[in-house]
């Protein structure tokens, strides 16, 4: 084989490997996802074990509600979107109710930073 063919073959194999790696994503089940989110909040906000358990339960319950709405074939997409927005709003209020005043301040700071990053990323895409 010539050096050029070897290089082309190597590039092809490398491309295939990277394509496969990108399409292989770890999908957490809802319970694991709720647990991960609660642990992340525990670390960021200094939640107690009781608060962490409450946040995990809230996140999981609202996730299940959202999935039920998405699966409802009797609703229009607009109805689903409205219900999901309401569920997310409820989840937000429930989580905030679990936090102390200091944790709530930090939580709102983290949310604001996340929104700024999203906005900057969206502006960068344009």
Image: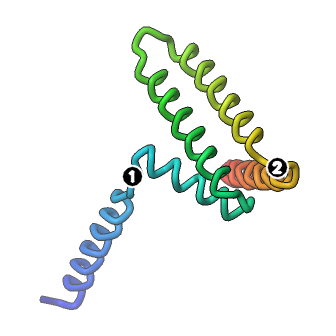
Mark 2 nearby-residue class (10 Å; few <14, some 14–19, many ≥20) = few
Q: Quadrant of residue 10?
A: bottom left
The residue positioned 25% from the left and 78% from the top of the image is 8
The vertical placement of 56 against 73, above or below, is below
Element carrying mark 1 = loop
The outermost residue toward the top is 74
The outermost residue toward the left is 1
The residue positioned 26% from the left and 72% from the top of the image is 12
Q: Earlier in the sequence, mark 2 or mark 1?
A: 1
The outermost residue toward the front is 50
Q: Name the spot of residue 83 as percent of width and height, x first.
A: 60, 19
Report which residue position mark 2 lands on.
100
Q: Which sits in the foreground, 124 or 81?
A: 81
Q: Name the spot of residue 23 as percent of width and height, x first.
A: 35, 57
Mark 2 to mark 1 CA distance (whole Å): 32 Å
Q: Name the spot of residue 81 as percent of width and height, x first.
A: 58, 22
The residue positioned 53% from the left and 56% from the top of the image is 36
Element carrying mark 2 = loop
Report which residue position mark 1 lands on.
27
In this picture the colour scheme is rainbow
Q: Which mark is residue 42?
A: none
Q: Quadrant of residue 11?
A: bottom left
Q: Name the spot of residue 18 as percent of width and height, x first.
A: 35, 69
Asked if residue 54 lies left or right of residue 20, the reply is right
Mark 1 nearby-residue class (10 Å; few <14, some 14–19, many ≥20) = few
Q: Which sits in the foreground, 41 or 4?
A: 41
């Amino acid at each position: 084989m010539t050096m050029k063919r070897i290089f082309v073959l190597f590039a092809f194999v490398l491309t295939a490997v990277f394509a496969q790696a990108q399409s292989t994503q770890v999908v957490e089940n809802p319970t694991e996802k709720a647990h991960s989110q609660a642990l992340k909040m525990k670390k960021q906000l200094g939640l107690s074990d009781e608060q962490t358990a409450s946040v995990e339960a809230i996140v999981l319950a609202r996730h299940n509600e959202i999935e039920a709405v998405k699966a409802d074939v009797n609703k229009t997409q607009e109805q689903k979107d409205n219900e999901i927005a309401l569920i997310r709003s409820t989840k937000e209020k429930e989580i905030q109710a679990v936090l102390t005043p200091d944790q709530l301040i930090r939580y709102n700071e983290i949310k604001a930073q996340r929104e700024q990053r999203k906005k900057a990323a969206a502006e960068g895409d344009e």
